[in-house]
Amino acid sequence: MIEFVARLARGAVYFTGEELECWITLRNVVVLPPTTPPDSAGHLVASPDAGKLNGRPEGAAVAFLSGQIHCQCLVEDSKMNVPARPNHGLERQDSSGGRRVSGMAPGPETNSFCLLATIPKLLAGNLDLEPGEEFNVLFSEIVPRDAMSPSFRGLALRYQWKLAFQCQVLGQQTTTIYIPLWIMVIPDLDRLLGLAEMDGRRSSMNGVPADDKAATSVETTALTNGTNGKDSPSPNSSSVALTNGSDAVTAAKSVLTLDMAMQILDSLTSRKNARSFNIDSSHGRIGVLVLTKTRFRLGEDIYGKFDFTDRSVTCVQYLVSLIGEEHICEEHRKAKSVAFSENIVSKSHDFCLCLTQSNFILPVPLHVTSSFASEIVEFRWKLRFEFALSSEMFHLEVPSVGNENQSVLWRPPLRVPVETILWDVPIDIYPTDPIQVHSVHMRESLVSDVRVKL
Amino acid sequence: MYFITGLPKIVSTIPLEEEDSFQFLCCNRERIFILILRKVSLSIWQLKPLVQLTAYRRSDMSVKNLGINVSALWKPDSSAIVVQTSDGGLIFFTIDTRAADTECYMLEDAKNSRRESDELFVKEAVPYISMVPTTSILVQGGITCLEALRDNVMVAATSGIIQRIQWDGSVDDSLTIVLDRVPFSVDFPQSKKSYLSNASSVHVVDLEYSFLLGGFSLVLSNGRGALMTANHFEFRPESVQCVWVPSEPCAFTCTAVNHKYRLMAFGCANAQGALYCIEDQTEGIQLTHRLQLLDKDCPDMMAACGPVEDLNWTPDGCAIAMIWKKGGFAIWSVFGALITFCLTLVHEGVSRSVSALDWGTEGYTMWVADPKVVFMYNFTKSALSVNNCSTNRMYVLLQGDNSVMLNTGDRVVAQPHGSSSASGREPQHKLFSNKAWMVVQLPHRYMATNWPLRYTVVDADAEYIAVAGRYGIAFYHIAVRKWKTFSNDTAEQLFVVTGGLLWWRDFVICGCSNTKTKTHEVRFYSKTRALDHSSAVVWKSEAPVITMNAFQNMLIIFSADSRLTLCEMDRKAGDVPTIVINVLQIISTENICPHPYCVVSVDLTPVRTETGQKKHTGIREAESLLINVSGRLWIIQRDSSDPYKDVPADESVVTTSNVIPLLLSSCVETIWVHPSTISSKEKPQLCEALWMFCGAHGMKVWMPLFTKDGTRRNAFLSRRVMLPVWLKSVPLCVQFDEAMIHGADSDLLYESGLDNKESDELPAFIVNRTSEVYLPQVLRQLLRRNLGTHAEEIAQTCTKLPYFNHSLELLLHQVLEEEGTSSAPIPDPLLPSVVDFVQAISKYLASLPVFLQTIAHCARKSDIALWPRLFAEAGEPTDLFQQCLNSGRLDIAASFLIVLNGTLGVGPVRKQAGALLEKARAAGDVELIAESARFLRALEMEEQETYRRTPEMTPSAKSPTIHPHPGPENMDLGNPISPQGALTFKYGSVVKQNSLADVGLSGGNKAALKKANSVPFNNPESVDGRSMSVVAAPDPTGLITTATGVQSVDRRNSESFNYLPDNSSILRYSPGTSVTSRNGWSRRRRFPGYAHAVEQV
């Protein structure tokens, strides 16, 4: 019996453009009939018919072993039209009747298709293994850089990345072994790569970082009652200068290393300029909101501060929610279905009626998908503020009276009429260090070791 | 352990132009309300939601008669307050709660708007209360401070008396204590008593009462402290006596008492703090530790901070906050480990002094009042501070008032080796560092009615977190990110968790009291089922449960009757999994425990003392009980002659108190024991150790010494040794298998708020997870105690750690730095034994040239002035270099080149470098060939430079540039252009001629002799799996080699490479490039005339 062991050198989380390395060991193990193979934690053992092969103690032959990375797209039929697209060489698993699928194969999804697949690499062919002998091979492949679809679990659509190995032991059916991956996309990578290289060169010349310390920008956002803010600021447009084309082309050739990716992310999400917003409502000014930045990485905290010193309307309380918004592109949207769905991942609330200055910390979880836009779906992040406002002015000071024998007692109001308004601030969320991300996914389905008996 | 997070909230401000100022603030006993005092007005706020409940402005007449507000005191039942005024007046107010059922601040939606989110609805009514002045009295001679004692107010006056005033304003003169008539004894209550002289006019400046200390902690106007006790709790004047606190060089200014740990804290005029405890046997007063900032934090503490203004313990007594007259605050753990300090509260323009500080509900907020602003910092605290159970010590778990932060620590993972024929080779071990916090926000459904969060616990596999607030419990499944709560509020309100929360297998265990039946229970809820009382297993306790812990299948319950109950838990599988509890033994702890509240933690551990040793079975059984009472760690050894296991289950439970507890250590905050049930074969010494965190006294490890076969080596050696380990941050988790300690610290996030604009911003903080490798320190302590063989044994168990070599370097470097820079002669230097130790270890690891590598890397990171000392022990650099060459480790040999350059003349160095080049050629190492050739060229030029004069150099900008090849990380060739310049060469020759002792003095180059300012690899965070090469490679951009003319150097083509060029003018070095290593650690100044010397050629 052949034992197949795959081990991802650095866990199962990668950026697109990064090189993935997976060690594969094929071992001809001698099976002792009655004992079942030990199932140690984290190893997936799939040996449905282990006993059948016992009568063949001599060497076994592996006809071939090949590996590839592919991305599967699963769509909710009721919400969107499946776009027609050619199959990228990878056959549908459920269509080829004769194959045995083990490991973590996707179920027979009628509305799933292969979005993207690398060309299968042949790792071994006509391999004879004596009992106890083993064969080691390294599978390395670059996660396609042009992929716009990170691993994503949305309501209307899911992107699943997998590492697939096809292996045929002589005299058996071909087995496909799937190892789930979690792939993260850095948007605009090619352009940024060119930029980072330029930055690196520039900073090496003069020894100072090339990022200039931009001044704080102040924007005024008018709020309308009960609706989303009509002119929300666009933080991601102009602050990164475009570079010329040649740099981008040269950069696209090379493999993205983890250090490069982290450098890009560091410069993208560094605290370049705090943004402050004057928040106004139809009744007057509420206060000033300061956000440290509008680009965050997974696992970071969003710090915000409200200053109510200069106000004409009292903010009684506020609630900030971090919301991921899944937009289905118009051409793929079903006629009557909704354009987007929202998912609240963290919230912060404060009763700030009596406060001069309040603040909030919103954690960006590590398990969510960063902002991206593929052909079918666009995933955006935003902060939603819900303000409960009172038009009555509120004075905490105890007034003094003319009479010098008179003391004064201040009592709170029994009722406070409030109006609620909503305001959305779009933010960008970028991926972060794959090792960190792996630490949260490990509890779920992602493993870096797979062991299958063939 | 308390950590500041985020920005402060500004509660209230007074405009600068107004004359008013904030005078004082204090919370009531339950910390639900806070009283804020201004000069003429006062207000009461509710902490959740944060609203002003009522405020009162005194009449102008009252201010004229009694003066402005100074301080205040809550009645313990929160039904009244008393305000102290500047002219010696006391104004009593009662809190009018007649209309408390009426709700105020009721939010009502306007007609065309609706709140949608649940969070915007306030679940709990805000009571409508007010304050009514009842009476005011004038105390002769002015008041210094107030303190509540039962139903009285103790009022200390400047006339040297302490009056007793009732809450209705009546004075009972018969209870007045006159300080002159109180006997004072020195240090011990039994010692000779004396009285204050009548003429001294000494009076009480500050006093605070603690029931558990049995008296008042006093600060007198002469700057001394005392403990005032009485044989009766009423403190009748005739029964009162005082014990002086041992005198300090500096006067005391204020005091605060810690009930749980029974400590008296005093603030001093020199900005420090001093803490005292009562010694149990003699009842004398002892200094336990001091609170002071180190010079590296604040060079002149006295000048920067001023006298201590106030001290305040957190509600659970785990930390103390200190504020200084000149502004700024610091937070220390109970036994004096500095957690956070901040001196930048002094705003630009406005001279501020922090006038008051208090902790809010459960210590989640810290309120600070300065003259014009009242602000509030948010805190997260370690789950250990309230729920000190064993699973919480396996991870770093922090709890805030609205979220839980978890870090599961770093992991060392075996990686398959990098070649296809690797089957026979050992796997590499890599470190996966994980500093990210997993932040879990608490469910609104639970917290809306059960705020604040009290207890938090994580299970052993870090899969579930359970929390308990005011009522009931809730738990969280980390993998699916879902909370489970009771279905309704009524079910939650059935019980209150009072004594800890645990995970045991698939059950959450809570020590609670039933609000309906008023009984005390231990409840078990299954994590697999819905939270529901019908499926709960309930075990009745006779007394309220104070704390609990579990070990394997044993549950240990400490209850308010000072008894420890040992139970065995047996899980019965079935449709409804259930637990059968079987009480094994009840142990009375009255003889070691003055009050049940003083118990910090109870543990059942496999730790054995020497006397109670048993044969080594491999299974870790419960061998001892560890009880932490007010910081004193007691060990109760299991009696092996009468094991509890032999007691049949049906036999009546025996209460035994004849066990003899041993005091293991005092000042213990937390302990750690390896959680595994099977004793570790790989690292027996490290895994069997008991760790104790002792605040200012550092971390202590109680480590077993045995050989692998479990036998004793030396009869005279004790079986365990206590070693101190000094940490840079507060430890929260010991990772035994990784030889690492994780902790957390509060770091300044933004010095001045978010937007950097306003000058009066307050600083913001962030909590970082920290980690430190403790191996070097443990090894060093063992070597210091002449336990070298044990150190070797321990080191041998750790060689698989990816940072093992780094640890050796760290060990060598630290000893070298300390002994090399010490001004006083060291009677018993450790350096020889450390070098021997490294050599011994490297013999054990025959495959790796650990010794040579450690010496080379250590030398490269140490100051050149320390080299003679190092090489006096390690052997001549030339010999070491030859060893490297002979063993074929050319990369290490390359590391030695720079050392040779510093110690030998040019000629010998050139010879050695030539030898290396030959070897490199033979090995075909292209990189090394190029680098050593470059080194030789540089040597050549330095040689010439010594006798050439130097005109101005004009670098040609047009010449093609060659970037030095970055090279592999592990090739530590260093900077081939000798950065120490010509002077060091002379210095180097001195080494050869003079005796070693003279070298330090005769060196002409002051800069070279100066101690290195920073130690680059001291940073614990540099232990990183991805870049384990700890020696900084030369900065590839630090030097730009410029080739002119025909000799454009092809670095790849080694054959055509002329490594001893006749004309050294082919190379020119651009001026002004600084020679720094990658991590910014400036090695040595470059010789200034150097660049010019080249041009001359």
Image (spheres, rainbow, N blue to C red):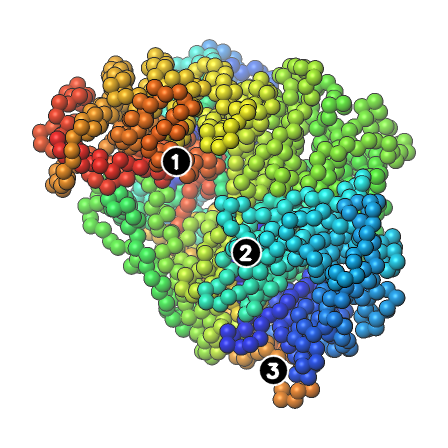
- The answer to which image quadrant residue A381 occupies is bottom left
Image position of B967 (left or right of B837): left
Q: Which residue is mark 2?
A: B305
- The answer to which image quadrant residue B940 occupies is top left
Residue positioned 67% across, 76% down in the render: B67
Q: CA distance from mark 3 to mark 2?
A: 36 Å
Q: How many marks?
A: 3
Q: Secondary structure at mark 2?
A: helix
Dot 3, crowdedness within 10 Å: few (<14), some or many (≥20)?
few
Dot 1, crowdedness within 10 Å: few (<14), some or many (≥20)?
few
Q: Which residue is mark 1?
A: B1010
Q: Position of residue B897 (x, y in %)?
A: 31, 23
Three-letter residue code for mark 3:
Pro
Residue positioned 31% across, 42% down in the render: A145
Q: Is residue B571 visible?
A: no
Three-letter residue code for mark 2:
Cys
Q: Position of residue B219 (x, y in %)?
A: 71, 57
